[in-house]
Amino acid sequence: MPYAEVCVNSPAASRPAFSYSIPANLDIQAGQAVWVPFGRQILQGIVIETGQIPGYPETRDIAGIIDAVPVLSAASLKLGKWLAGYYRCPLFQALGLMLPPGFERRSIGLLYPAENTTGSASLSLGDDERHLLDRLNRCGLLHLKDIEKMLGVRRAQRAVSSLVNLDLARRQFELEPARVKPRQETFVELNISDRLYRETIDKLTKKAPRQAAVLEYLFSQSGPIPWRQIHQATSASTAVRNDLAEKGLILASRQQVNRRPIPEAETRAETPLAPTGPQAHALKNICQSLNSNLGQVFLLHGVTGSGKTEVYLQALAEAIRLGKRAIVLVPEISLTPQTIERFTARFPNQVAVLHSRLSLGEQFDQWQEVRQGNYNVVIGPRSALFAPVPDLGLVVIDEEHEWSYKQDTSPRYHARQVAVEMCRLHRATLVLGSATPDVESYYRASRGEYRLLSLPERLAPRIAPALPEVEVVDLREELKSGNRSIFSRALQNELAGTLSRKEQAILFLNRRGGATFIQCRSCGHVLGCRRCGVSLSYHFEEEKLVCHHCNHRQAVPRVCPECSSNKIKYLGAGTQTVAAEVAELFPGARVIRWDSDTTRQRNGHRDFLHAFREGRADIIIGTQMIARGLDFPGVSLVGVINADTGLNLPDFRAGERTFSLLSQVAGRAGRGHAPGKVIIQSYYPGHYAIQAAARHDYPAFYTRELAYRRELHHPPFSKLIRLTFAHTSDEFCQREAFRLKAELEQQRDCRGIAGISLVGPAPAFLHRLRGRYRWNIHIKGSQPVRLLEVVDLPGRWRVDVDPLGLE
Ligand code: ADP
Ligand code: ZN
Ligand code: ZN
């Protein structure tokens, strides 16, 4: 077939694919990665399809193939097209999600002096041009990047163009070197018969003892041995190896080896547990879908500790039994060694892990091995959904309500949404699990789009009460009765009791840092970041104010910048403040602070958790990180210092978020011997999200939340697309936002697209971020995307389909 439609890796590509002709000597298939000429550059491209007639009449030749084997399957190409359409992103970006780690390579621009620059002295050149030409002639070659660094982008482009136009310099593009390659190692094996071996050893032992040592080592082993291993055993140098190879006594070869993040020997095998009634019911349904390729979507709803993971494990076993493979997604935060171990223990040597904390080399090798079918299960965060798993039969998304499944850079996909589409393409079964399902997922289940499976009760491993008792404390009452501590009297009493019984407690905060913001007692001024317009956090240890958006740091002022009063006071509570107050009230208590400040080191949190689990601390104080996926048998008390922090956010999902966070926190207590108690402190104790979380009552929360969503026509009763524009000038930003809104309205009305409303423009929640102002427009309706299909959105507008949270 002489023509190929190729999706080109260039931000300048104006179309999803371009037509190229296939030179006679190349064998090209759909899904293959190729080099193509694009403008003056040679770029990477993915062949979308091949055919007899080009989509566009003028074609250039494909320059070469990157890999003989297609890098993307037909299903992946389809999924890529769906992603680009649904999330309104360039096709290459969508396909990029499915390419091997480190695949994408940019071309780098280089500037060379022209062969003959005599006479340039007589030309009247600007200062930049003159300076650049001198430098170029001295160096013989400059990177365009470095020139841009030297002069700034605009001046650099101007100077380079004028030198090129005057034929004083020549621009050329080359590909940057590959960032990752298969790892090659030298392997060595004996190349002499057993009979000759003795003779040789005798000869060598005196003359060349090191060579003899290597031969003896090889003789004691079988097959080709990595040279690294021989070197470790005999400390022989490469020179020794070369001598032996030259004499023909050994054969050395380069072989590809795989970097594996889970060492094989470490896993211990474990057998399935006999399912309880509800587990058996859930499994029966899931296995039916697996066996008959029904490709159903299940929502597995069960509180923490109700046995969801056991259901995943047995469903995986069934998929593997049927010769299929599976993907398990977990939120990044719970991708802990314990989680991975639960899966590897059940399926030894069959589990691959794919996540960004692995080295690029490890990611690359795991990806290749997954594609070769060496693993039955792939586990990882949202990106693992795009692993090249052959014969995909099952996808599991644990904690499906978690927001980390939504990517916050383009393509802004949600792994759940993509998984639904992906499973449809593969006729694979999808299991979504959660203790607090996303309201939209539960709504779909209630309408029969998903099958709802419930695990109604908690499986207490050792006879323990079903779920902890939860008490909501009204902080307004505390203040009225003169208690100025951040701990209510109830929480103080419970803490004292817990400590005296030698049990453990978790104190939970929705923030990090010290006293979170600083407010002037005289005039009420709150110190904020000048670039981002959000309040600055006080960090005790450095005695600095820190912006949590742009990382701006400054000293704490002595007097209020507004009114010059010296009554600048620390307000709010962070983990440090709570730790300080615990130390004052309970001097003997051993405390661990667990937040992103103290656990930044690679193994930071593992060490903390280990110490706590072993009982080497009495109280752990932490931020939202401790709310998820962790299991501490010794904990009998959980205190939520302030439940309201999230409720006041101007986001229609604030209630859902607070409910799910509080439910998860409450699920931390009472998993072991001791009965659990949870204390939630709040200034709005009557709020339905707090009340429902306190009673472990998902249906009550869901009913109220859904009524509110229906009334205000929020998702799931509508779909949203958020458009964001950013600019250093607030005024310009605002003007552009209003201009676009007018255009959108006009297009909607003159094309008669019904059922779409435009919300805003409004300044974004983080109105100023990294020195730029941001304005949002929301398109709301049953099919808001229809409007974007007919409007040419300027490239600087950012599109977020199904946005989550505030921007
Ligand atoms: P979840 O994933 O819902 O939090 P898990 O699957 O982790 O729940 O189960 C909670 C605890 O109960 C675990 O310690 C697990 O080993 C145990 N468990 C789960 N299913 C069973 C079962 N059928 N029989 C006995 N113990 C079980
Ligand atoms: Zn003041
Ligand atoms: Zn800032």
Image: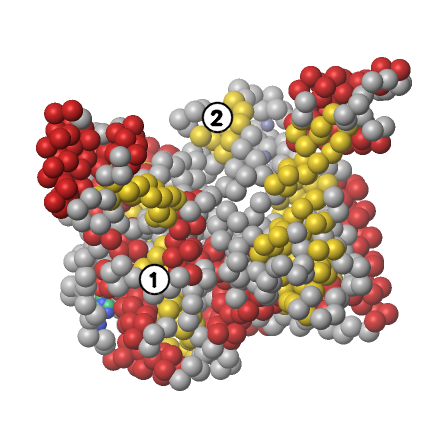
> Real-space Cα distance between discs 2 and 1?
49 Å
- Which residue carries the number 1 mark? 375
Q: Residue at x 43, y 40 (%)?
A: 512
- The disc placed on residue 124 is none
* Corner quadrant of residue 513: top left
Question: Which quarter is ligand 1 in?
Answer: bottom left
- Which residue carries the number 2 mark? 544
Q: Residue at x 80, y 18 (%)?
A: 130
Tell me which colouring the rendered structure shows: secondary structure
* Other-residue count near label 1 (Cα within 10 Å), few / some / many at <14 / 14–19 / ≥20: many
Q: Residue at x 76, y 74 (%)?
A: 754
* Corner quadrant of residue 719: bottom right
**Which quadrant: the N terminus?**
bottom right
Residue 792 image offset from top left, x and y in percent? 79, 58
* Comparing labels 2 and 1, the label whose residue is closer to the camera: 1
Residue 666 image offset from top left, x and y in percent? 33, 57
Choose between 445 and 521: the one closer to the eye.
445
Q: Amino acid at mark 1?
A: Tyr
| On screen, residue 783 above or below 153 | below
| On screen, residue 428 above or below 536 | below
Element on which disc 2 rests:
strand
Residue 519 image offset from top left, x and y in percent? 53, 32
| On screen, residue 234 above or below 317 | above
